[in-house]
Image (cartoon, rainbow, N blue to C red):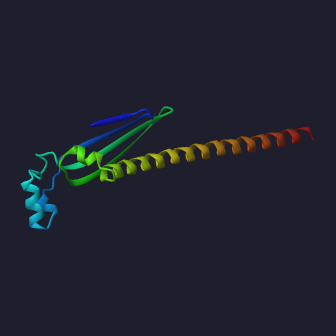
Amino acid sequence: MKYANENNTTITFVPEFEELSPRDVFDNEDDIQAIYAAGIGTCGVIPEWFCAHVHIEYETEGESFEADNYLGTCSYNSFKEFTTQEDGYYKDMISVCLAEINRDINSLIITNLKSKLKNRLSDKLTAKIVNKIKRLQTV
């Protein structure tokens, strides 16, 4: 499922195969039986037992940034339920991806600023040295 918005951002949700079965995750036999009774938990065959994968791409000024977040052993009545919960894991996963992209952008900005500052300092130092050489040549 792919969602795009006007801010050069693409959010993709992919329900992936979950390798673990409910028996691998839950200790309470009643919980395990309830999952199987609901038709959920056949280890990826029924899609409501899945590993959630959120992928975000953001493009700006010729730069592209990407981030991924995974959450395994998801058990929901539907993918829609997972992606539309008001304060659910899906929104948390998006927040994690956006935070990673923001860190990457900030890191790039800092790197570029350091480089520009270094070049400016280097240019100023070079100009001072050239001026000193010129003064020495006139003496």
Residue 17: image location, x then y, percent:
17, 47
Q: Residue 133 versus residue 20: which sits nearer the camera?
A: 20
In the visual, does 48 lie left or right of 120? left
| Residue 38, placed above or below residue 25 | above
Q: Residue 80 versus residue 123: which sits nearer the camera?
A: 80
Residue 118: image location, x then y, percent:
65, 45
**Quarter of image, res 116:** top right
Q: Residue 68 versus residue 73: which sits nearer the camera?
A: 73
- The C terminus lies in quadrant: top right
Q: Residue at x 72, y 40 (%)?
A: 123
Q: Residue at x 9, y 66 (%)?
A: 29
- The N terminus lies in quadrant: top left
In the visual, does 72 lie left or right of 115? left
| Residue 101, placed above or below residue 31 | above
Q: Residue at x 9, y 53 (%)?
A: 38
Q: Residue at x 28, y 45 (%)?
A: 83
Residue 60: image location, x then y, percent:
48, 34
In the visual, does 66 lie left or right of 115? left
- Most distant residue in the bottom direction: 28
Residue 63: image location, x then y, percent:
47, 35
